Amino acid sequence: MIKTDALIIGAGPTGLFTAHQLKLIGLNCEIVDNLDKIGGQCIELYPDKPIYDIPAIPECTGEELTNNLIEQLKPFNIKFHLSERVDELKKNNSNWEIKTNKGTKFSTPNVIIAGGVGSFEPRKFNLKECQKYENNSVLYSVKDKTVFKGKTVSIFGGGDSAVDWAIELSKDSKVNLIHRRDEFRGAQLNVNKVHDLNKSGKIKLFTKYQLKTVNGKDNLENIEIESDDKEIKKLDTDYILGFFGLIMQLGPIADWGLNIDKKTIPVDTEKFETNQKGIYAVGDICNYPGKLKLILSGFHEGALAARACFKLARPDEKYRFEFTTSSKTIKNRLGIKE
């Protein structure tokens, strides 16, 4: 049985920063993630995707962000339990007892559910013909953007992922961006940029169109898209990228007695605690009035949840807030010599 001040479920950016905050205030923690690598969705689905809304970092990729967060954690030697899923969680007096699918057992007063919980998979095209080219020419994430260089890529979707990748890939590829509506859900600044690139011919934009069929023998050759008015266009293409969001499978978490609402967990905004004392939710999985699904929001949530953990982990001590710039205690934990 591993005893720790807090157990974090999820090794994505929010989970990593939450671990950093726990260690800064002197609490021990360990991290469990059902993926085989650190970084969560950022590293599994979008390692090359440019991110523009991290404070003080004009642009970075999901992989770069993950590597920087790992570097930030280096002074603390945190133990990761990768390729493990939390299957059982039960209360034992003032502690939670947790067991993973590999039999690892933890005892802790604090459990922090961070970001993506359970398993997730991308929503896919309904066309059966797409299955023939799946993981070859029909893709739902970008793990190496260099494969698209000099190729024609048809991107489907209207959210941030579709818009961001259309802009990024248009630098070295021919890009068709197809969306079933006129309105996009992506950040307005980038939507405006897509329209500018469409005017300059760097992107071909097709709105109120959907995929009708795919054509080719061994390799994808072209696609047909159909408008709301039943107009059909044939587009030569080497790759199809579909960005329709993720299907979240909560898995065992559904049986933990949490007040789950539409696959998210309501929390308070003081401690980010759920309806179960000592269980917190931060990142995309949590919900509250005014919630923004941004990485920077997850960082804020993790910082507050970490400090809430102190009371349960050290009931006989009083937490004293300190600034990292002036605290000798924190600098010692970071290995900084004055």
Image (spheres, helix red, strand yellow):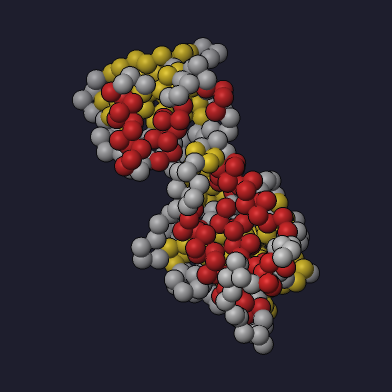
* Snapshot quadrant of residue 316: bottom right
Residue 21 visible in the snapshot = yes
> Observer-nearest residue: 133 or 149?
149
Q: Quadrant of residue 310?
A: bottom right
Position of residue 237 relative to residue 267, above or below, is above
Q: Residue furthest bottom?
A: 316
> Among all residues in the image, which is located at the extreme front?
338
Q: Position of residue 127 (x, y in %)?
A: 42, 28
Q: Quadrant of the C terminus?
A: bottom right
Residue appearing at x 79%, y 69% in the figure: 1
Nearest the eye: 264 or 272: 272
- Pick whichever, 277 or 228, lies toward us: 277
Residue at 39% in and 61% down? 291
Q: Residue at x 28, y 23 (%)?
A: 199
Q: Position of residue 118 (x, y in %)?
A: 57, 54
In the figure, 247 relative to 242: above or below?
Answer: below
Vertical order, 265 against 142 (above or below): below
